[in-house]
Amino acid sequence: MSLNRRSFLTALPLAALPVTALTIAAPRRARAEDIRLTPRMLGNPQAKVHVGEWFSLTCTHCAHFQQTVFPEVKAKLIDTGKIAYYYHDFPLDQLALLAAMLARSLPVDRYEPFINALLFSQDRWAFGQDTDPRKELQQMAALAGLSNAQFDAVEKDDTLRQAIIAQQDQDQSKYMIRGTPYFRFNDHPYTQELLTYDDFVKQVQQAGG
């Protein structure tokens, strides 16, 4: 990730950035004990197959996967204990970064429902005509339990912001991630879009599931 993209994130306010801009900032890690930075996962941690998804909350392909494929994955593979499913933040713009910060500031058990709600309503809060994405996020965060004061505090939390970006930077360098959603089935990367549940199952089977 280039220095220019990092500088772009820190130089402009949220309102000045287009939703589609890829933004990265210089890393500064939060304290290791910060519970907001602990792994977010669903399913059986002892499962033979561990699936990781790197996603951006303003990525339309990520939203499509969440809406059309993930419900069946959750019902048939996650809830039945056949796989462990790990979420990895990979925000592609400043709005997605703020959304990721809000999600990680919620109690752990509210993380997945909030992510799910954001991806299912992405066309409204992120891309709706004549809407203020920040206000839309603030309203959704309030429904999840964050007060306006807490929202403002999260938005100003540069330690959390830099920690998420630093992890994204590390993951991109390690796995050469070029787009979202990006999946790993155990140690097997999958860089194309998974359009059906059957496509997903094939990758689980190839990984040993």
Image (cartoon, grey):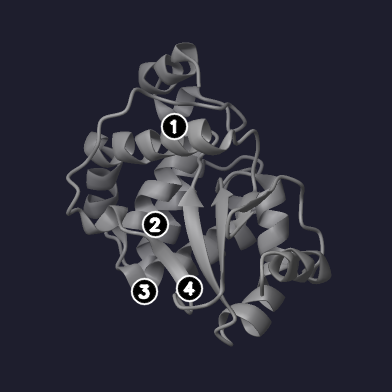
Position of 148 with respect to 89 (left or right) is: left
**Mark earlier in primary sequence (1, 4):** 4
Badge 2 local density, few (<14 within 10 Å), some, or many (20+)?
many
Mark 1: amino acid: Asp
**Category of crowding for the residue at label 1, using alpha-carbon neighbours closer than 10 angstroms: few (below 14), some (14–19), many (at least 20):** many
Expressed as whole percent of the image width and height from the top left, the position of residue 31 reads 17, 45
Residue 1 placement, left or right of 151: right
Tell me which residue sits at (57%, 55%) in the image. Answer: 53
Q: Earlier in the sequence, mark 2 or mark 4?
A: 4
Residue denoted by label 3? 109
Query: Is residue 32 rendered to the left or right of residue 18?
Result: left
Nearer the camera: disc 2 or disc 4:
4
Q: Could you tell me which residue is drawn at 48 percent across and 73 percent down?
A: 42
Is residue 46 shown above or below 85?
A: below
Please state which of the two labelled residues, at mark 1 or mark 2, is closer to the viewer: 1
Please state the horizontal and vertical placement of residue 204, each as a whole percent of the image.
69, 68
Q: Amino acid at mark 3?
A: Asp
Give the residue number, with chain letter if any, for mark 2.
Answer: 103
Label of residue 122 in the image: none
Rendered residue at 46%/64% (across/down): 114
Query: Where does label 4 land, which residue?
Result: 42
- Residue 169, disc: 1
Q: Secondary structure at mark 1?
A: helix
Q: Quadrant of residue 177?
A: top right
Mark 4–mark 3 distance (CA, rounded to whole Å): 10 Å
Q: Earlier in the sequence, mark 1 or mark 2?
A: 2
Structural distance between the alpha carbons of marks 3 and 2:
10 Å
Disc 2 marks a residue whose amino acid type is Ala
Q: CA distance from mark 1 to mark 4?
A: 24 Å
Q: How far is disc 2 from disc 4 in space, using C-alphas?
A: 15 Å
Q: Quadrant of residue 49?
A: bottom right
